[in-house]
Amino acid sequence: MTPDPSIRAHVTLAQGEEVVHVSPWSKGGMFAQLLLLALPLAGLSLLLIAKGGEVLGVGIVFGVLAAITYALAYLSWQRRLAVVTTRNVLFVAGLSKTVRAIPLEQINQVTVAPGLVTVRTGSILNTLLLRVPDAEVLAEKIEQARQVRT
């Protein structure tokens, strides 16, 4: 994926810092949210609506809650980016655009498995796993940026 000029709307870069690569990423959270919250709410909603009568309104409310839960899960999942810059690797997540920056100098190891990039910045406790569609490309861009930086 080529660097998107609109990435500056998602993150604030330091003066002289340039975007090298942008990749969408996932932690798999959307599936868990759907299974644990949205689907049970939708099922309860359908059950209450099918009963009709006094509980029809409650069923509609649960249906709306299920739709909102699904929409928020989907939108936050869509808004996850891994951004490699000339100074940092940035991880942008969610609707609030929470950003975690890892300076290239602090990255000790980058490993690749099919669809998965592991970034280590010290001990095993400081390990980040990214599920990305272009794992090899992302790892290569991180390594290239690290070599240029050192």
Image: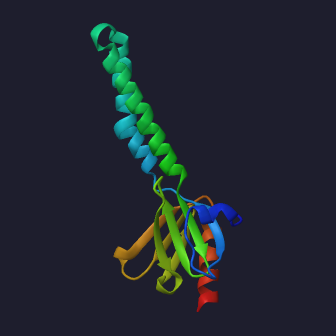
From what the image shows, is residue 15 above or below residue 37?
Answer: below
- At x 48%, y 74%, the residue is 101
In x, y percent, where is residue 122?
A: 40, 83
- At x 35%, y 37%, the residue is 37
Quadrant of the drawing holding the N terminus: bottom right
- At x 39%, y 35%, the residue is 38
From what the image shows, is residue 126 above or below residue 57?
Answer: below
Q: In this image, 141 relative to 61: left or right?
A: right
Q: In this image, 5 relative to 63: left or right?
A: right
Q: Closest to the observer: 48 or 110?
A: 48
What is the residue that sits farthest to the left in this orientation? 54
In x, y percent, where is residue 6?
A: 66, 61
- At x 57%, y 62%, the residue is 114
What is the residue that sits farthest to the bottom in this orientation? 150
Quadrant of the drawing holding the C terminus: bottom right
**Is residue 96 among what the camera can see?**
yes
What is the residue that sits farthest to the right in this orientation? 2
In x, y percent, where is residue 108?
A: 48, 84
In x, y percent, where is residue 143?
A: 60, 80
Q: Closest to the observer: 146 or 56?
A: 56
